[in-house]
């Protein structure tokens, strides 16, 4: 497979994996927030709900990684990236909730707007996460690269 075609396929698989994990996280957030969970805890629960599917789908399906040795090298940078994303979502949703509580009385509208903030945070991080996953988390170690895989298109 040619390098540009491989990159497009990788991007498509990453996008699909992210959408699946994002839907799981968003549904968890909406449910928790709707039931009265504070935005910080709703964000944490939503993060936990989507993190495992996101890791497995990206690692195995998008980047085609299966070895156990790779997993130990991948887990710490993966965890740092997704925890930073979760913290950003928790901060953004908490701020949105705080601002909306005094301005909108409808719990339904508060849920919609705070949930949109949660989703927007993950949307903003989408491209940055792809670059970090590709370059640092799921990148092949230098010794395993062939000359054809070392050039970036």
Image (tube, grey):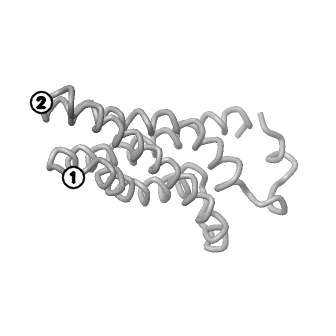
Residue at 60 percent of width and 52 percent of height: 63
Can you say which quadrant of the picture contains the C terminus?
A: top right
Depth check: 64 or 99 in front?
A: 99
Please state the horizontal and vertical placement of residue 128, each as a whole percent of the image. Answer: 60, 39
Q: Count numbered badges in the picture.
A: 2
Q: Is residue 54 left or right of residue 72?
A: left
Disc 2 crowd rating (10 Å Cα; few below 14, some 14-19, many 20+) is few
Please state the horizontal and vertical placement of residue 76, each as a whole percent of the image. Answer: 61, 64
Q: Is residue 106 left or right of residue 148?
A: left
Depth check: 119 or 21 in front?
A: 119
Please state the horizontal and vertical placement of residue 48, each as a whole percent of the image. Answer: 37, 59
Label 1: which secondary element: loop
Question: Vertically, is 64 above or below 106?
Answer: below
Question: Vertically, is 99 above or below 146?
Answer: above
To which residue does mark 1 refer?
37
Q: Earlier in the sequence, mark 1 or mark 2?
A: 1
Residue at 35 percent of width and 34 percent of height: 117
Mark 1 touches mark 2? (CB < 8 Å): no
Q: Is residue 127 left or right of residue 147?
A: left
Depth check: 108 or 148 in front?
A: 108
To which residue does mark 2 refer?
106
Can you say which quadrant of the picture contains the N terminus?
A: top right
């Amino acid at each position: 497979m040619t390098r540009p075609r491989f990159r497009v396929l990788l991007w498509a698989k990453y996008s699909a994996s992210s959408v699946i994990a994002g839907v799981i996280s968003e549904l968890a957030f909406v449910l928790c927030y709707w039931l009265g969970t504070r935005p910080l805890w709703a964000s944490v629960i939503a993060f936990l709900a989507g993190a495992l599917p996101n890791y497995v789908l990206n690692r195995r399906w998008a980047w085609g990684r299966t070895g156990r040795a790779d997993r130990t090298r991948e887990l710490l940078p993966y965890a740092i990236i997704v925890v930073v994303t979760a913290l950003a979502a928790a901060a953004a949703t908490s701020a949105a909730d705080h601002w909306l509580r005094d301005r909108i009385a409808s719990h339904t509208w508060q849920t919609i707007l705070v949930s949109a903030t949660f989703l927007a945070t993950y949307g903003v991080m989408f491209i940055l996460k792809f670059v970090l996953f590709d370059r640092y988390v799921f990148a092949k170690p230098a010794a395993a690269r062939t000359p054809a895989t070392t050039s970036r298109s």
